[in-house]
Amino acid sequence: MRVELHCHSTLSDGSFAAEDVARMAVRTGVRLFCLTDHDTCAGFERTREILEPTGATVLRGLELSCREGDRNVHVLLYGLTEGPGLDRLQSRLDRIHGERSERLVAICARLRRLGITLDTDALLSRTHGRTPGRPDVARALVAAGVCKTPQEAFTRFLRDGGPADVPLERLTVAEGVGLGLDAGARASLAHPHTLGDFATARVLLRANREHGLLGIEAYYGSYARAESQRWERLAHELDLVPTGGSDFHGEMNPAVTQPGIGLPAPVAARLCAWLGVAAA
């Protein structure tokens, strides 16, 4: 079964509009889809209008920025439903949006101290109506001729702990998962390899399983089969549900050229049962 449960549009740090991501997913045969822009689910209706007529199942979701100690952790929320829980989550997302805008201003100030001046007002105006983030600064650095690619901008300036990075206050994993569950969602740990090592991922998942973090992204765009099997074994050990997504961004992740990832039939069946949707 071909699914896409981790992808991004121009509503956060992707290169393509939500509608275009949905059309690409149609062309690649995706049967279960969720647009997971950072800290926003604004593109849900647009993707549903395109994918549902093809018979695909479309969920409302997002990728929530959280923390665990001094580590950044991303949690994928699937199946958000309208109601008071989603209203509470949206209120927190609105605060995050404001904090992200303030962060861009602070990053530009750090760049000025490094001798690089960007038009902060123009940068903020380009983020109107969507989630602002470091990729916006990366693109501005490319446009200004400071860097050749967004990846270079992150390597030189914007990476976590980089010379122009400004830490962003984040929800704890338990807080983020709790907000998601109150809004009817299922929660999965995104790209577990980014936590640094296998042992750290195991500890985090064990600590947050009781809070409702019951999924792990064992199938990921850049994972070889052996890597997926490694995370599947951890899922089995902790009784978690393996999830899958490409992390499609467009130019910000050029190694992934299109949305969609294939799941083995047993994995897809368990995933669909967990999400409460029909298996294709």
Image: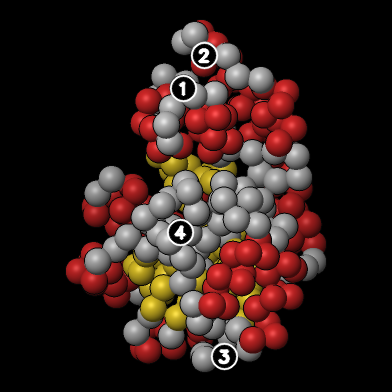
In the foreground, 160 or 31: 31
**Tag 1: amino acid:** Val
Q: Nearer the viewer, mark 4 or mark 1?
A: 1
Instruction: Assess whether mark 4 and mark 3 are in contact (beta carbons under 8 angstroms).
Output: no
Comes first in the chain, label 3 or label 4: 4
User: Callout 1 environment at 10 Å: few (<14), some (14 to 19), or many (20+)?
Assistant: few
Secondary structure state at the residue bearing disc 3:
loop
In the rendered image, residue 41, in percent from the top left (x then y), is placed at 68, 58
Q: Determine the image quadrant of residue 219.
A: bottom left
Q: Which residue is mark 2?
A: 116
Q: Can residue 220 be seen at all in this image of the molecule?
A: yes
How far apart are the alpha carbons under marks 1 and 2? Answer: 8 Å
* Residue in the picture at 70% in, 46% down: 130
Task: Give the secondary structure at mark 2.
Answer: loop
Disc 1, SS: loop
Residue topped by disc 3: 278
- Which image quadrant: the N terminus? bottom left
Image label count: 4
| N-term-proximal mark, 4 vs 1 | 1
Q: Which residue is mark 1?
A: 146
Please state which amino acid type lies under the numbered disc 4. Answer: Asp
Disc 3 from disc 4: Cα separation: 23 Å
Q: CA distance from mark 2 to mark 3?
A: 52 Å
Which amino acid does the dot numbered 3 rest on?
A: Ala
* Mark toward the viewer: 2 or 4: 2
Q: Amino acid at mark 2?
A: Ile
